[in-house]
Amino acid sequence: MNPAHPIPVGLLGATGMVGQQFVRQLEGHPWFRLAWLGASSRSAGRSYADAAHWVQDCPMPEDIGGLLVQGAAPGAECPELVFSAMDASVAGGIERAFARAGHTVLSNSRNHRLDADVPLVIPEVNPEHLALIPHQRRERGWSGAIVTNPNCSTVTLALPLAPLRPLGIRRVLVSTLQAVSGAGYPGLPAVDVLGNAIPFIPGEEDKLGAETAKILGELRGEDPVGDPGDHIDPYPAVVSAHCNRVATIDGHLVCVSVELEARPSPAEVRSLMGGFRGRPQELRLPTAPERPVRVTEDPDRPQPRRDSMAGRGMTVTAGRIRECPILGIKFAALGHNTIRGAAGASVLNAELLVAEGLLR
Ligand code: NAP
């Protein structure tokens, strides 16, 4: 379905690294019109052009530059649908206040991702988890909702793993090489990161395991009122992660070894990943990529394609799919951390909510 009129949307954390990517993703969006911007008291009351330190490689959209940034509190002017890209140290309480006030919040922060009643969604992988929303509303006594998308490295891992679920994923060993834009702005001091690889990203390794298990997990249960979506049974695979920060600007690379109950050949894995499609492709959502996972046989530098408006930066590229002498199969995958790993993921979630009639 296409909405008859563009739906106004708000954006919390509009001035930050992910907030700026939202501004880009929403420019010219056929369904959504960015109408309200929120950030901290440092930015509130200033025009967006003045408050945001714009670091994108394209000009700031003129109509957005003139908008006045608001404080991060719900109010009459803020639209029902609100994207959130706030610093995790403050996001939890502010997002709950918006949901309590009736807003549907699409969050990029870690705060509520693992809450039992909050969907953590990759639309191609677990769209059925949105059935937690009515349960969440009743549990929390609010008319709004919080829906989350995964951490930027988790989505780059979970998307190529999802088509392997029928083969029984047992154990996953993953090493990440993560870009500096993943640390926000201003992020890491140049002297720390230039010419360096930093083998520690706080909290990241635990997130990769717990979020992947929830996303690949199964929606179960039926409560007394008859809502499906009582809870998610986490997928039982064991994930062990090493996370490293490297001096690239955008893009997270994950190097994965995986043990599967079935013992597929690399060719079978290639075919499963390359043939993977989900609900966004079926519904032809505006920013759904034609293929969520692009498989390449190139030995070097598999680049995500930026060939069309639909799916810009939303494809994860998987390559070097080959035998692993220890776990069975190994591959590398590359995803754009502020698009598929953040703003683009939220926008696709919002399109799914609209298409499935889940906005109030
Ligand atoms: P960032 O560049 O540091 O931006 C943080 C944003 O939060 C800014 O807009 C800032 O507004 C706002 N903020 C800070 N304190 C606030 C407060 N007290 N009240 C309201 N707003 C406040 O960070 P980022 O990289 O964009 O990340 C944003 C969120 O997305 C984080 O939770 C992060 O973990 C998550 N995330 C990031 C990535 C990535 O690749 N960067 C990927 C996935 C998820 P001011 O400018 O006014 O201070």
Image (tube, rainbow, N blue to C red):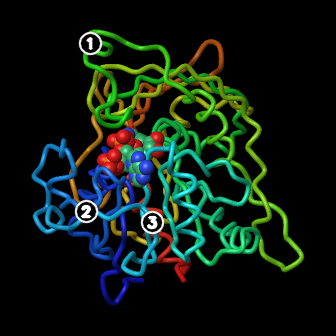
Q: Position of residue 181 (x, y in %)?
A: 32, 34
The residue pinned by badge 3 equals: 73
Residue at position x 59%, y 45% from top? Answer: 162
Using the image, tell me which numbered label, if any, was put on residue 191.
Answer: 1
The local crowd at label 2, few if under 14, some if 14 to 19, many if 20 or more residues have their Cα within 10 Å, is some
Give the image quarter of residue 41.
bottom left
Asked whether the viewer can see residue 342, the reply is no
The answer to whether 338 is drawn above or below residue 82 in the figure is: above
The answer to whether 62 is drawn above or below residue 318 in the figure is: below
Instruction: Please tell me which of labels 3 and 1 falls first in the chain.
Output: 3
Residue at position x 63%, y 21% from top? Answer: 328
**Which quarter shows the C terminus?**
bottom right
In the foreground, 76 or 356: 76
Three-letter amino acid code of the residue under disc 2 = Gly
Three-letter amino acid code of the residue under disc 1 = Val
Q: Indicate the secondary structure of the residue bearing disc 2.
A: loop
In the foreground, 156 or 100: 100
Q: Indicate the secondary structure of the residue bearing disc 1.
A: helix
Instruction: Please tell me which of labels 2 and 1 falls first in the chain.
Output: 2
Asked whether the viewer can see residue 169, the reply is yes
